[in-house]
Image: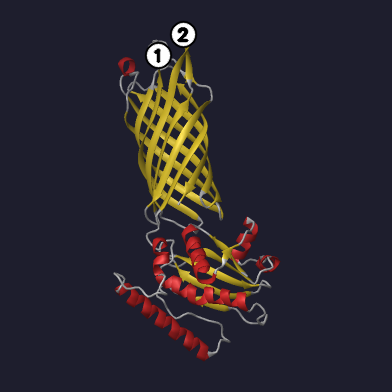
Amino acid sequence: MVVYAGVVGPHAERADRQLGSLLHHDGDIKPARLSDKDQRSLCTHDARSEKVAARLGKDGVVAGQVVKGKRTNRLRVYVYDGDGDLRSQVEVPLVGDALDKGGIATLRGSVVEDAVALGKAHDAAPDEEPVIVVEDDEAEPAKKADDEPPAQAAADDSAADAEQADDGEAEADDSNDEAADDDSAYFADDVGAPLHMGASVGLGVIHRDFLPGGRPVAGYDSDVVGTARFAGDIEPTENTRLDFITERSLGMTTPVMGERAPTSLTRWEAQATWALVTGKLTLAPAFGVGQRGFSITSTAPSRSPDGEYLYLLAGARSQLTLGPRTTLAANVRIEPVIGGAQSTMSSYGSASRWAYDLGLTLDVCVKPWLMLRADAGFQSFSWTFADGGQATDRYFGAVFSLGTRY
C-alpha cells in the first residue's frame, strides 16, 4: 500500500488537492495521517525523510513541495519506497498556484506510475537509482537518470508525445466528444485562476483614550471593553489581495453625571495590496479607505466630545511564512483624514487630522478549512488646530478569530 503525505509550501492548497485527487483517482492512493514535523520532512526531503518513510511501514510514500522557480512557482514531488529510499523526483511548473493539463499529464506518467508500481512490486532492487524529471516552463524534454536504457527513454518520450497529442485533440472536440479514459474534466475546477477567499469572525478587546492637549475639553480614558469583528479577503490574482474588516464595541458605557451612558466604538476598512516581492517573505504596497467612529449617547455638555474620521490609507503590508501552516503579517500605514464631523469646531474651529496605524496578524491553519487568527493593532489620530493647539485620539485593540480559507 502506498500513501500520500500532502504538499507544503506557499499557497499549496490547490496543488495539494489536485495531486491528491490524481493519486486517488488513478492509483487508489489515500492520504496518510502524519504529524506536522513528519509531513514537512517528507515533503521537503530533508535528513529525516528516509527514517520517517521507513517508519510508516508502507510500500511507498508520495509527498510534494511548492518551491519558487525562475518565473513562477513549481511543484516538486518525491516518491519514496518502503525502505525510505528516494525512487523518483518530478518537478513541474504551476500556473498561478495550480497544475495545468501538461503538469497533470507529466505527474500521471511519472509519479502515479512509480507509486502504483511500488504497490505492486515493493521488493524492487534497493540499489536502483532514483529517476529525476524536471519539466521546464518551456516544456523541454524531461531529464532522467543516466542509467536509464535509451530505448526505454525513447519509448517513454513517444508515449508522452502521443498523450499530449491526444490531449490536444480532446480539447479541440470538447464540445461533445470525450474519450472514455480522458478524465481531464475531473481536474477542471482546480486548474482555473488562482482565486483565494477567506473570512473570519472574532471577539477581542479595545481601549480608547483622548488627550485634549491643554484645551478646556473633557478627555477620555475608557476601560478595556469587548469588541466583535468580521474580516474577509479575496485574492483574485497571484499578487493581488483585497481585505475588508468591520468591528464594533460590545456593552460599552461611559459615566456621565452619575449615570452610565451607552457608548460605541466602530470601525470599517477596505484595503487593496499588490505584492512586489513574493516568496517566504511577501512585500506589498497598500491603499484603501476606512472610517473610525466614537459616540456617547448623552446631551450633557461636560462629556468628552464624539469622534468621527473618514480617512484614506497608504502604506505597506508584509507577510512572513513561518511554517507550512503559519504566517505572520504586519501593516504600517499613514491615514490622512478626509471627512467626518468635528464636534469641537464651534469652539475651536476646524482642525487638520491624520493618523498612523500599526498592526500584526498571526494566522495558523489547523485544518485545510479552519484557521486561527490573532490580531493586535494601534491607531493614533492627531489633531492640529488653526491656533497651533493639538489633541490626540488613540485606539488599542486585540482580537482572536476563527476563520476559513479557500
For image coordinates 63% across by 79% down, the residue present is 121
Image coordinates of residue 240 in percent, x first then y, are 38, 52
Sequence-earlier tag: 2 or 1: 2
Image coordinates of residue 215 in percent, x first then y, are 41, 16
From mark 2 to mark 1, how far is it between C-alphas?
A: 10 Å
Type of the residue with mark 2: Met
Please tell me the numbered disc located at residue 206: none
Residue 29: tell me if it is visible.
yes
Image coordinates of residue 49 in percent, x first then y, are 65, 66
Report the quarter where the N terminus lies: bottom right
Q: Which residue is mark 1?
A: 298
Q: Secondary structure at mark 1?
A: loop
Please tell me the numbered disc located at residue 257: 2
Mark 1, residues whose alpha carbon is within 10 Å: few (<14), some, or many (≥20)?
some
Mark 2–mark 1 contact, CB under 8 Å? yes
Choose between 343 and 195: the one closer to the eye.
195
Task: Residue lying at the far front in this picture: please name it.
Answer: 180
With 261 as the anchor, is 49 left or right in this view? right
With 302 as the anchor, is 2 left or right in this view? right
Choose between 223 and 117: the one closer to the eye.
117
Res 351 → quadrant: top left
Residue 71: tell me if it is visible.
no
For image coordinates 59% across by 65% down, the residue present is 44
Please tell me whether residue 98 is drawn above or below residue 160 in the rendered image.
Answer: above
Q: Secondary structure at mark 2?
A: loop
Type of the residue with mark 1: Ser
